[in-house]
Image (cartoon, helix red, strand yellow):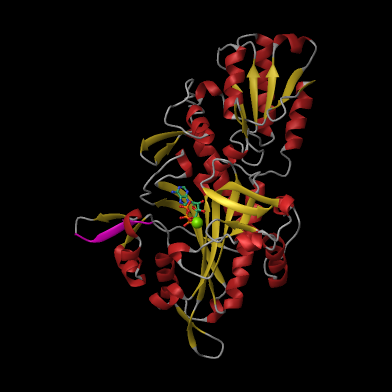
Amino acid sequence: MRLSRYFLPVLKETPAEAQIVSHRYMLRAGMIKQNAAGIYSWLPLGFKVLRKLENIVHEEQMRAGHVPMLMPTLQSADLWRESGRYDDYGEEMLRITDRQGRDMLYGPTNEEMITDIFRSHVGSYKDLPLTLYHIQWKFRDEMRPRFGVMRGREFFMKDGYNFDLTKEDALHAYNRHLVSYLRTYERMGLQAIPMRADSGPIGGEDTHEFLVLAETGESEVFYDSAVTDLRFGDRAINYDSHEECAAVMQEFTTKYARTDETHDEALFNEVPEERRRVARGIEVGQIFYFGTKYSEAMGAKVQGPDGKVVPVHMGSHGIGVSRLLGAIIEASHDDKGIIWPEGVTPFHCGIVNLKQGDEEADAACDTLYNSLTALGLEPLYDDRNERAGGKFATMDLIGLPWRITVGPRGLKNGVVELTSRRTGESEEMTPAMAVERVAQIYKGLTVRGI
Ligand code: ATP
Ligand code: MG
């Protein structure tokens, strides 16, 4: 993309309404625009990152054997009356009446709708196990929408639902989700720690939240610092193996890590004092096992191998895809702007032309641009007729992890400069070498956006 043809409405001033750094930078970098409290337009740069996150979530869910689909944002109130949640959900539910006077709602989540789909089509244990998921906009009329996309009213969420014959199978689905979530967050350059949590209005027995540690997080968390040393990494896993998934669950949830809702002071005090941490975190996902709560209320049953008809065991599993943009920025920025992890960056590399209009500099930039593009990479070429200082400030603000700087002086010696956004370190090299280095950095990171 050439910046002169892009839409990147960067703000010079820091917007007064933004209280936390991710909100400030998302507004300043021209990623989002608020349209009403907690409701945002995703401008091109923000949309690009959102799509990348969505793609990572899809890839990891499908890898775990979960099946993608799409349900609508608007739902009929009838299903929610069946489960009893139409009255229970309260003011967070946006209720709408259509022209026929029918009660509708903008879905805050989809347990009822998916249970209805399931009961309409599945009647035998032979069709299980089954996990269906979608990534769709949700609406919750939050009392205090704030912090930009972190606590929106309209937000983008992955929600998945497992249907299993037995509790044991459903707990395997729970563990499988935990593993797939660990992989998902790590690919986004994030450490999200599974913490024992409270199930709240969804109801159920088992639940973990995934938290990204950050001072600006809304949740208070208590943990053994040894949990921060755990990494899933690129180890191979057989998602069908109950034992393998259970072992990962054990590994990641045995050490003390809880939100304030389930915090147990006595247990916490058993952690060696020098490893006890009290901090804040951002909830970026949650997994639930809730047994037969919805399947019994809504008649989602299957015939088992013994001929008996039984309600299925279910769980639901969410990832806050739009909130993740905020969480990533909270975890990765400096005083100049965002620093995108390579796995989610909107463009792989910036190209800054120090002297637009200089024949050689323009030609060198075009060559770099074409070579990177030919390798399947997406550069953002700042081809505007602007001063170098302004170009650097924009690149630093929008946070591309790598930048190639091209100027007539370097070109006289046959070199350009490759700069790391994270360390600020620069290295001179030939343009061909710079292309090779950037290609090397992104090798294996195949996610494309839009
Ligand atoms: P919270 O406690 O933050 O209100 P929740 O526990 O009610 O969230 P879930 O039902 O678990 O939310 O939804 C799954 C995920 O969706 C959450 O882990 C979170 O990342 C994200 N999410 C929930 N509410 C919002 C919101 N208002 N804005 C953005 N993301 C949200
Ligand atoms: Mg939650």
Residue sitting at x 45%, y 65%: 202
Is residue 156 among what the camera can see? yes
Question: In this rendering, would 194 be left or right of 300?
Answer: right
Q: Camera-side residue: 76 or 408?
A: 76
Q: Residue at x 62, y 53 (%)?
A: 222
Image spot of residue 283 (x, y percent): 54, 51
What's the magenta region?
A: 101-107
Name the residue at the left extreme. 100
Q: Split into 4 quadrants, where in the image is the N terminus?
A: top right
Q: Is residue 119 above or below residue 212?
A: below
Q: Is residue 114 above or below residue 385?
A: below
195 on left or right of 202: right
Q: How many numbered circles are shown? A: 0
The answer to whether residue 20 is magenta is: no
Percent position of residue 280, x then y: 57, 46
State whether residue 225 appears in this view.
Answer: no
Residue 103 lies within the magenta run: yes
Q: Position of residue 356 (x, y in %)?
A: 61, 12
Task: Give the quarter of the figure containing the C terminus.
Answer: top right
